[in-house]
Image: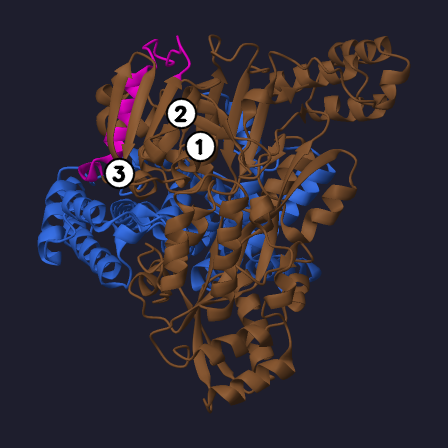
Amino acid sequence: MNDREELAALTKAAEQGRMGRRELLRRAAALGLSAPAIAGLLAACGASSGPSASGAAPSAAGDPNGKITYGLGSDWQTLDPTFYTNVAEREIFYSIYDPLVDMDQKLDIQPRLAKSWDVQDGGKTIVFTLQPNVKFHDGTACDAAAVKFNLERMLDPKTGSPQRTNIDAITSVDAVGATTVRLSLKEPFTPLLGSLTEGPGFVSSPAAIKAGGKDYGLKPVGTGAFTFVEWLKADQIRLKKNPSYWRSGLPKFADLVWKPIPDETVKLANLKSGAIDVIDNVPSSDRKSIRDDPTFATWDAPGTRWPMIRLNLAKPPFNNKLVRQAVSLAVNRADIVKAVYFGEATPALGPISPVYKSYYDASIDKYGLGYDPSKAKEKLTASGATNVAFTVEIQNVASQQRLAEIVKENLAAIGITVTIQPYAITAFQDRITNKLYQATIGSWTPRPDIDGTMYRHFATDGNVNSMHYSNPDVDALFKRSRTLANGPDRVKVYQDVQKLIVDDAPWVFLIFETQTRAWSKKAVSGIPQIPDVMVRFAEVTRY
Amino acid sequence: MLTYLLRRLALFIPVLVLISILVFSLLHLAPGDPVNMIVGEDRPGPEVIAAIRKEYGFDDPLPIQYLRWASHAAVGDLGYSYRSREAVTQVVLERLPTTVELSVLSIAFGLVLALPLGILAALRRGTWIDAVSSAVAALGISMPAFWIGILLIYLFALTLRWVPPSGYVSPTEDLAQNLRLMVLPVITLGLGYGATLTRYVRASMLESLGLDFVRTARAKGLSGAQVVFGHVLRSALVPIVTVLGIETGRLLGGAVLTETIFALPGMGRLAVDAILSSDFPTMQGAVLIMALWVLLANLVVDLLYGVLDPRMGRS
């Protein structure tokens, strides 16, 4: 905020009686304001008397000319959905673009650019009917041809899109009419709709892609609630209200600024000082103080990240299922929750996070391999393995180090020796890709459809199954799940899958982490709490 | 003078080539396939990975890859970022001014701190002034930048609310705000630098104070100030300037941390982000420019010798 903006904010605060005289004077003096200017401010402060001066909730209407500044821990490399790989990139897309479909708080698929869809031919064809008369920020039409152009660009292997894997069930895309798109699939593929709520579902202006070439990712053109203004690298991305946004009445404020702030403590200091209005995650150690502070609102999203230990089933000692089970039984997850996550996590006994609502199986306590050292010893003895020792590979970060040390201590108690080996990120990733590890700590975040979390890890041909895990029963169930619509039958299939995986123990399930967004109550309200933890700013109000 | 300068500049070329070979080999021989970082954790199928390998020429032998990169770099084209697909030359040029501003202001801050403290400590050797100077220097040297940075943010941004905690505004857009935002980073980076310098200034002054010409100057009846500023300081400056040059590299290292703490869009943060995402072209570009910077700083130091001590002139 520069001085002018700061003065405007102060004046507004004074008029609305949100700030006491003393505070006002202090801040005005800090800005170096002249005496007459301060007198003016005080008059504004005096003008608002009565109950509102006690810091009551601001008016519901919000400020259509307001600005929201959002601080995030990671930075952007591209604003082209075809090439995106990180969550900060995905999150800003919900402001610049619209996905074909979106999800609601219950993970149900909702219309967006597609106002309806029809699953035909036993699931092998999906016909989308698009919203009519939607225009990109450059004025060109967002029609069936544009959707076809975007999907085909992503599907073409020559494009090199990291997103291709999520939609490669599509064999052809046809623009049947101006607002009708038909997708033909190799086989029924329920997870596709989920994928179209994110990366692959965002629609860019074909004209802008052709004109931009390699540089399109620097000046994105979508249909979203905000248009792109400028990108000051490593400093901020500025967006402004799209005045002709097709969803009427949205967005509710004028300017949206995205700031990458790599240091978590500094990011929090920015929120506390009022320099930014919303932050993407509060460090676990600071959550209590933020929740207890009436100035801030928080949104806790449990189970939106989960660290685990991958075990390599092709190498000893983890080619022995009983050893894997013994390790799982020996890990005290409550210690990890307390010592590494300051209580901001829950123990995990299986791969399905509570974020998946109905898919989460609350009865997992009965069959999960939770902390039970005596049973762990029994399993280890039964396995016939002696002098069990292994190396756990971790990334060079403090939280993984602490986690690994607790595991090491837990396993020492049942006679297993653990060596902790840290690697730099690239080498670490390489050892996973080439399946060189014995055990390695990783983490995962939810994908819109549960298939995106499960299949790629635990199917024999899963693209990130580095554990050499293969169970034909699991594969058969996955295959079936892809043909079933969301509902009790599909839930049942996943609960069966989970039982098999828990018993095979290719991962040591550790914890489900809670992520916490926080914002200043005085500035912002109405952030929709969608389980993917991406903020949709179109619906947010700025005071 | 001009020939001397040209000769020195010409010497840069082999040094830069050597550095570029070193950086290139270190990056490419270290374990880790850049394709992993380009595709992210979703890992597309082998046909996409093959397309990416082909596009970036990862399948060519390393010497071929180096020559391709070096021949372009020689004419100012540092290639394209693996991640953002931008021209690296452009990216580096965008980031350079922030780091230049941070460094220049930090050097200035360091000098403003070190010269008076160091000189006073030398002149009043063994007194409480000397003790205070030593204490300040020890504190400045031993406090890590990330810790000072966070402390300064808590004090000046959260408690006193004099300045915003972090961020950047270009000086061409709003100079006053730019300087306000630079205050904390400059103190963070400049403090350790100034503290180190204080020790050198003190030592160098003490050494000069003991030389014969000082006795002569005093014997000629010059005042204390004339002796100190006209003679001692000038002779003491030669080793100090040498340290200034040597410390340039360390200053850049400190800029990496400082830029990360204060979210400044500079070269240091560019290099860190590039390392974390295995963005080799950006990494190579950033390191090459930083190496050039250190070489130039040392050239300036060499030229300054001539000014400070004409005997060292052009020989």
Secondary structure under tag 3 reads helix
Mark 2 belongs to which subunit?
A
Q: Image check: B65 left or right of B283?
A: left
Q: Is residue A320 above or below residue A37?
A: below
Q: Badge 1, how many Cα within 10 Å: few under 14, some, many 20+?
A: many
Q: Which residues are magenta?
A: A130-159
Amino acid under disc 1 = Thr
Residue contact at pointers 1 and 2, CB within 8 angstroms: no
| Distance from Cα at disc 3 to Cα at disc 2 | 46 Å
Q: Which residue is mark 3?
A: B88
Residues at circles 3 and 2 in contact by the CB criterion of under 8 Å = no
The correct choice, above or below, for A245 with respect to A538 in the image is: above
Name the amino acid, label 2.
Answer: Asp
Measured as percent of width and height from the top left, residue B231 is found at 45, 51
Which one is in front, A85 or A219? A85
* Residue plotted at (40% across, 11% down): A134
Asked if one can make out residue A380 in the rendered structure from this viewpoint, the answer is yes
Q: Position of residue B170 (x, y in %)?
A: 45, 27
Give how far across and how far down residue A61 sits, in percent: 70, 12
Q: Colour of chain A?
A: brown
Let me know if residue B115 appears in the view.
no
Q: Which mark is residue A197?
A: 1
Where residue A205 sits, quadrant-wise, is top left
Mark 3 residue type = Val
Q: Estimate the x, y position of residue B169 in percent, counting from the top left.
A: 49, 28
Q: Mark 1 vs mark 2: same chain?
A: yes
| Numbered mark located on residue A118 in the image | 2
- The subunit letter for the residue under badge 3 reads B
Say which colour chain B has. Answer: blue
In-image side of A53 versus A405 (left or right): right
Q: Are marks 1 and 3 on the same chain?
A: no
User: In the drawing, does residue B202 fall left or right of residue B287?
Assistant: right
